[in-house]
Amino acid sequence: MARPVPLIAGNWKMNGLTASTRSLASELATRVRSDRDLGFEMLICPPFTMLSTAAELVRDCALKLGAQDCHTASSGAHTGDISPAMLRDVGCEYVILGHSERRTDHGETCALVRAKTRAALDAGLKVIVCVGETEAQRDAGETLRVVADQVTGSLPEGVTAETLVVAYEPVWAIGTGRTPTTAEVAEVHAALRQTLGTILGTGAAEGVRLLYGGSVKPDNARELLALDNVNGALVGGASLKVDDFWAIASAV
Ligand code: PGA
């Protein structure tokens, strides 16, 4: 199977007011529109409150829109929650699920991430399911087991390569300026590909995009994105600066 088109995804986290959203989304949209041979797919995931603003700015443009979480139900009595149907309605194509900050801050288990993934796929969204070990787990030599368990536990039956993206984000690398070595990233991504092979079949697993995330910056993007089995990046802090985010994407 041909190497999938790399995905460069920006996870804005709890950042973005109206003015900054307008300037960041419109500048990225302008660059995407003017690049005839975009060798990558670019995605921004603003907070819920800014999705509608961003949707207007990326309309008729290859710049994609995504959210950072969703509920398992399509509507109902769930105060404060946002459903996959609402995300589709506002213009989202993607949703990030199971980010380590959700797993930690909100106690999200693999079972809940699996239910959210099922609901998001049923609503017609593509999912970016996040996995990654803590520093203690890495030090204990448990990395490969932890990420395999998270992938297996977080994916529902019937996922397909077209709608599934998996992001490997070591918890200790998120927002810290530290990254694993390229050999360590390559090892985990190869293992993830193998695990996906047992779930989807080897051929289909080749088509799933595997993103690396955790302190991706313009100066380390090239070596990370060049690795086998790394099909893009999930970028936090650096996705809030237009030149940095564009530089990371251009490193593809
Ligand atoms: P970071 O965050 O790039 O700021 O490390 C990545 C993420 O949490 O998705």
Image (cartoon, grey):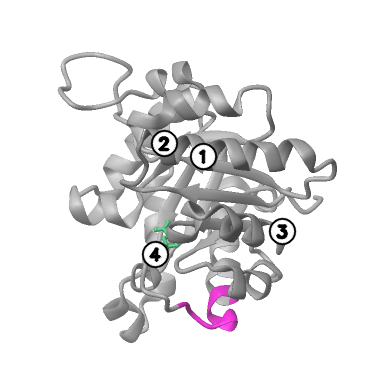
Q: Is mark 2 within 8 Å of ligand 1?
A: no
Tell me if residue 246 comes above or below residue 83 in the rendering.
below
Q: Position of residue 138 (x, y in %)?
A: 36, 80
| Tag 3: amino acid | Ser
Q: Which residue is mark 1?
A: 23
Instruction: Find residue 156 and report its image quarter.
Output: top left
For residue 96, above or below residue 60: below
**Residue that numbered label 4 is attached to:** 132
Give the Cα distance between marks 3 and 2. Answer: 25 Å
Camera-near label (4 vs 3) is 3
Please name the residue that numbered disc 3 is placed on: 250
Closer-to-camera residue (101/45): 45
* Crowd class of label 2 (few under 14; some 14 to 19; many from 20; radius 10 Å): few
Mark earlier in primary sequence (4, 1): 1
Q: Residues within 10 Å of mark 4 (few under 14, many from 20)?
A: many
Q: The residue under label 4 is which amino acid type?
A: Gly
**Magenta segment: does it hold 72?**
no
Residue under pointer 2: 19
Q: Decide if residue 84 is on the left or right side of residue 6.
A: left
Marks 3, 1: nearer the viewer: 1
